[in-house]
Image: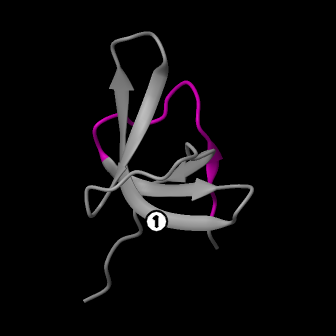
Amino acid sequence: MIKFMKIGFGTPINEKILLYWENSKHIEDGTLIWCDDGDGFTHMLFDGECLNDEPTHWMYLPEVIK
């Protein structure tokens, strides 16, 4: 079962996690980055790209089964 949490207090910053966009239902791995300019956070996807909208939810990456 996938359990995403709303981005807010306690969300990992500068750590690879799964990001979720509620409006588009898009899921992708990436990193949240805190902006020093007072705008809160931004994101960077695994391939270095950013989407126009910020993600709304997150979860830790699941363990890889070998």
List x then y, in percent, for residue 11: 48, 35
Residue shown at 75% from the left, 56% from the top: 23
**Left or right: residue 45 compared with residue 59:** left
Q: Nearer the viewer, residue 4 or 34?
A: 34
Secondary structure predominantly adopted by residues drawn in magenta:
loop
List x then y, in percent, for residue 43: 40, 42
Tell me which corner region of the image, top left, top right, bottom left or bottom right, holds residue 56.
top right
Residue shown at 46% from the left, 65% from the top: 28
Residue shown at 36% from the left, 55% from the top: 30
Amino acid carrying label 1: it is Glu
Please identify the quadrant where the N terminus is shown. Answer: bottom right
Range drawn in magenta: 3-15
Colour approach in the figure: one colour
Q: Nearer the viewer, residue 7 or 39?
A: 39
Tell me which corner region of the image, top left, top right, bottom left or bottom right, holds residue 62.
bottom left
Would you place residue 24 above or below residue 34 in this image? below
- Secondary structure of the residue carrying tag 1 is strand
Mark 1 closeness class: few <14, some 14–19, many ≥20 residues within 10 Å: some
Residue shown at 48% from the left, 53% from the top: 51
- Residue farthest along the right direction in this orientation: 23
Is 8 magenta? The answer is: yes
The residue at which mark 1 appears reads as 28
**Left or right: residue 41 compared with residue 66:** right
- Residue farthest along the front direction in this orientation: 52
Would you place residue 38 above or below residue 40 in this image? above
The total number of labels drawn is 1
List x then y, in percent, for residue 44: 34, 48
Please identify the quadrant where the C terminus is shown. Answer: bottom left
List x then y, in percent, for residue 26: 60, 66
